[in-house]
Image (cartoon, helix red, strand yellow):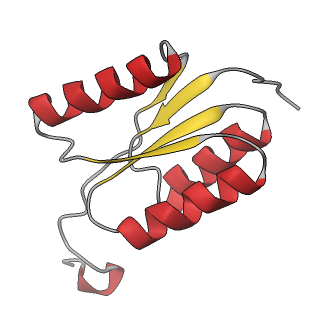
Amino acid sequence: MIRLNGKKALVTGGSRGIGRATSLLLAEAGADVAIHFQKNDQAAREVKDLIEKKGREALLFRAEISNRVEVEKMVATAGEKWGGLDILVNNAGIWSYGEMGNMPE
């Protein structure tokens, strides 16, 4: 297993799906994780709680990933809190068709 003890990570889109799994894996490996999310604060809080149960620190950041000012503030705040970031996982994405059942043919 990879050991990331003492490392600080930021995962965009870190509250659901692949981002959630990545956030939890990083924490399992010993990293503290900053979780970016856009809308679902309940899902983000759940991931934060799971990370903290692993004995790691977690930060939550609500931001519109397409807004440069919000992203810069998120990165700066996490960096100031932890003295820098070691890992960035760019996972945030946009699903423009909504639910899977609404995909065009």
- When the figure is inspected, residue 33 is found, relative to residue 76, above or below; the finding is below
User: In the displayed structure, does residue 8 sit left or right of residue 24?
Assistant: left
Q: If the image is split into quadrants, where does the N terminus sit?
A: top right
Q: Which of 92 and 24 is in front in this view?
A: 24
Q: Position of residue 92 (x, y in %)?
A: 34, 46
Can residue 30 be seen by looking at this rendering?
yes
Q: Nearer the viewer, residue 75 or 11?
A: 75
- When the figure is inspected, residue 52 is found, relative to residue 16, above or below; the finding is above
Q: Which residue lies furthest to the bottom in this view?
A: 101
Q: Quadrant of residue 67?
A: top left
Q: Position of residue 2 (x, y in %)?
A: 82, 27
**Residue positioned 56% across, 44% down in the render:** 58
**Residue positioned 46% across, 61% down in the render:** 44
**Residue positioned 16% across, 36% down in the render:** 70
Q: Position of residue 38 (x, y in %)?
A: 27, 56
- When the figure is inspected, residue 30 is found, relative to residue 40, above or below; the finding is above
- When the figure is inspected, residue 100 is found, relative to residue 10, above or below; the finding is below
Q: Which residue lies furthest to the front in this view?
A: 81
User: In the displayed structure, does residue 57 sit left or right of residue 29?
Assistant: left
Q: Quadrant of residue 99?
A: bottom left
Can residue 16 be seen by looking at this rendering?
no
Q: How many marks?
A: 0
Q: Quadrant of residue 90?
A: top left
Q: Which residue lies furthest to the right in this view?
A: 1
**Residue positioned 78% across, 43% down in the render:** 28
Q: If the image is split into quadrants, where does the C terminus sit?
A: bottom left
